[in-house]
């Protein structure tokens, strides 16, 4: 199958290479010369122009977007619009908000272009291990591009699913990332507890490796933690600052909107926000209050 991959960042380039290895014809599109040069070394075609890339593909065409969520997706679709034809399929493999995906599907439907939202998990390991794909959109359109999903997934019959109509794929990926927040927070707190039990002088990498086999808490996240602790037991040089991609926030907002309690996911998101406070006003106020009502000592900077 012929595919234009728009966005040759690390994940986009990895996906393009996996498709290329799987026998698909891939044209990678990116405005950055460095990204194009790097992608070209992987063996597939590259272009700086959306128009040029689409002109070389037979109609109907498949366009896969791997660009940042939000305004960039709309800008990319606007650039694509003059070059799309009836029957084309646009797949958004990024972390778009599911309601945006629903809106975009309706917009493209007016021009008889199908919009498929594909929540993609696998990170930098996807090239080697395959990607977990949560797909939303019209059943006919998904069936037409099914060969792509079978190639990107860990196996032809596993790791991917057409989960529902437009928006459903990105909705499932949103919840997936919310769950991920909670799991990561639980591991982080557990290992911090062991790290503080200095009387036992625990080797955290050793503990993690023991848990990797037979334990009910074994997982890929644990595997990655074991690797990280093995390389850097004290996590030297790593700042206690945790970013979020926005999907945890969307998950919490959706939980509130649906009246579904999600305390673990919510607290894990708040902990990420807390990690960014270098000089917490709330903690300083707490210390001041303790001093006011109980005369407790205040530590100076």
Image (cartoon, rainbow, N blue to C red):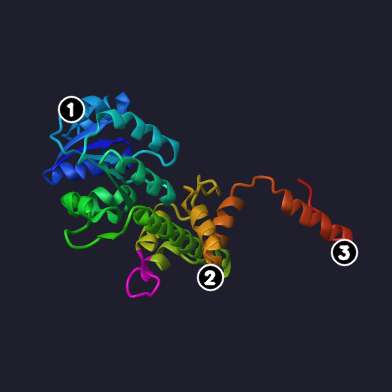
Residue in the image at 20% along x and 45% along y: 18
Residue stretch in magenta: 209-219
Residue in the image at 13% along x and 47% along y: 22
Determine the secondary structure under disc 3.
Answer: helix
**Mark 3 vs mark 2: which is more N-terminal?**
2
Residue 156, quarter of picture: bottom left
Magenta run includes residue 139: no
Tell me the distance, in whole angstroms, between the alpha carbons under discs 3 and 2: 35 Å
Tell me the distance, in whole angstroms, between the alpha carbons under discs 1 and 2: 65 Å
Determine the secondary structure under disc 1.
Answer: helix
Magenta run includes residue 216: yes
- Magenta span dominant secondary structure: loop
Is label 1 or label 2 in front?
1
Residue in the image at 14% along x and 36% along y: 59
Question: What x and y, as percent, mark residue 2?
Answer: 15, 39
Residue 5, quarter of picture: top left
Q: Which residue is mark 3?
A: 294
Eyeballing the image, is 280 above or below 179? above
**Mark 1 vs mark 2: which is more N-terminal?**
1
Quadrant for the C terminus, please.
top right
Circles 3, 2 touching at the beta carbon (< 8 Å): no
Q: Which residue is mark 2?
A: 200
């Amino acid at each position: 199958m012929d595919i234009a991959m728009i966005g040759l960042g690390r994940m986009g380039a990895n996906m393009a290479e996996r498709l290329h290895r799987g026998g698909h014809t891939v044209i990678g599109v990116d405005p950055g010369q460095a990204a194009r040069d790097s992608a070209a070394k992987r063996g597939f075609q590259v272009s700086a122009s959306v128009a040029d890339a689409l002109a070389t593909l037979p109609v109907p065409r498949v366009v896969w977007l791997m660009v940042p969520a939000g305004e960039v997706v709309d800008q990319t679709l606007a650039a694509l619009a003059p070059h799309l034809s009836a029957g084309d399929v646009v797949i958004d493999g990024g972390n778009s908000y599911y309601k945006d995906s629903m809106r975009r599907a309706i917009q493209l439907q007016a021009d008889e272009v199908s919009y498929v939202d594909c929540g993609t998990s696998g990170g930098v390991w996807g090239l080697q291990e395959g990607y977990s794909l949560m797909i939303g959109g019209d059943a006919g359109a998904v069936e037409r591009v099914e060969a792509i999903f079978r190639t990107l997934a860990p196996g032809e019959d596993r790791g991917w699913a057409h989960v529902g109509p437009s928006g459903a794929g990105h909705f499932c990926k949103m919840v997936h990332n919310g769950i991920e927040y909670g799991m990561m927070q639980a591991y982080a707190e557990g290992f911090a507890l062991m790290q503080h039990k200095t009387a036992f002088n625990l080797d955290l990498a050793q503990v993690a490796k023991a848990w990797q086999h037979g334990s009910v808490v074994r997982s890929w996240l644990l595997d990655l933690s074991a690797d990280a602790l093995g390389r850097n037991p004290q996590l030297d040089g790593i700042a206690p600052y945790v970013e979020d991609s926005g999907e945890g926030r969307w998950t919490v907002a959706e939980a509130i909107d649906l009246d579904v309690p999600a305390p673990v996911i919510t607290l894990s998101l708040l902990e990420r926000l807390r990690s960014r406070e270098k000089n917490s006003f709330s903690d300083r106020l707490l210390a001041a209050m303790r001093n006011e009502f109980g005369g407790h000592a205040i530590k100076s900077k």
